[in-house]
Amino acid sequence: MKPIRQSLSKSDIQVSYLEWNQGKEPLLLLHGLADNAVVWSSLGDYLAAEYHIVAPDMRGHGESSKPETDYSFESAIADLEALMDRLGWSKAHVVAHSWSGKLACIWAKQNPARLRSLILVDPIFIWKIPSFFKLTFPLLYRVLPFLKGMGPFASLEQAQMQVRKLNQYAVWNSLQQQVFQAGIEQKADGSWGSKFTIAARDRIFEEVMRVPGLTVTIDTPTLFIQPEKGVNRQQWQLKPYKTHLTNLDICQVPGNHWAFLTESQAFNSTVAAFLKRHS
């Protein structure tokens, strides 16, 4: 069963999402910075028989609205809770990748009743970032590999050539091609670029810098997925999670930061095993 593209209209924005409405157990899949809901296609298909799965395009991404301002964690969490309310979900299992891992930790702190379990996939930026780092953000935008896929590009072919150099597209299988196609568009001037907007990029980085992710004890059952070639390879990087998450499992999987795109079989089975224990 393939997912259906749906849309939730709020007073401020529209939230577009993919829905696998076959199973019963609520499961929410949150993509990382500059990605879109299609990154979860393999996992969604794999789990569809047992779970009612929703994967939103976060605000500023994919097919969802792209406001010029308001990329606070509070607004993003409000989007997710409005989506759950529409679906009639009181709580859900949550899988969150990269930047949205910090968002999910903040959500679990603010409203733990909405999260039945939490799977953090190679999360980043969990601390509050010192304000002087804001001066380096323009440089960061140029050197972070995944942001090089934003463009602009003179043609679709040029965009494809560039993104195939990025880690998440290394294999260039059919899933990776679908993710690329879902995340790019032709602009008004004829150039090509990411649907992820500059305003969203800048505001999200500002929010990440301002707000710490883990500050109190959280007892939500949590799985930390640590890809072998991911960004969390040192013990000091894991320390905040071990300190604040009292019901934590850590599991290594093959692949890089985007293990669900590059090593989907191992990733999917790891997620399935954890969810089965907590369903």
Image (spheres, rainbow, N blue to C red):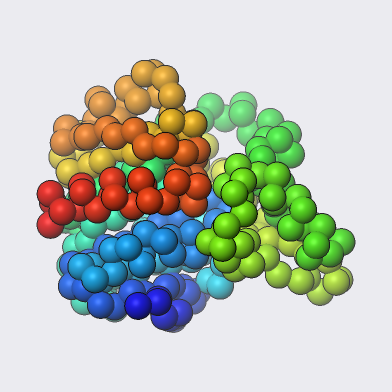
Asked if residue 13 shows in the view, the reply is: yes
- In-front residue for pair 239/204: 239
- In-front residue for pair 274/243: 274
- Please name the residue shown 37% across and 37% down the image: 253
Q: Is residue 78 left or right of residue 13?
A: left
Q: Position of residue 59 (x, y in %)?
A: 51, 64
Name the image quarter holding residue 240: top left
- In-front residue for pair 251/125: 251
Q: Is residue 59 left or right of residue 169?
A: left
Q: Is residue 154 above or below residue 123?
A: below
- Please name the residue shown 74% across and 62% down the image: 193
Q: Position of residue 164 (x, y in %)?
A: 69, 50
- In-front residue for pair 65/260: 260
The quadrant in which the C terminus is found is bottom left
- Please name the residue shown 75% across and 50% down the image: 162
Q: Is residue 2 above or below residue 74?
A: below
Q: Position of residue 161 (x, y in %)?
A: 77, 53
Name the image quarter holding residue 233: top left
Q: How many marks do you count on the picture?
A: 0
Asked if residue 68 shows in the view, the reply is: no
Q: Is residue 223 above or below residue 61?
A: above
Q: Is residue 233 above or below residue 253?
A: above
Q: Position of residue 277 (x, y in %)?
A: 12, 49
- Please name the residue shown 62% across and 46% down the image: 170
Name the image quarter holding residue 29: bottom left
The quadrant in which the N terminus is found is bottom left
Q: Is residue 2 left or right of residue 90?
A: right
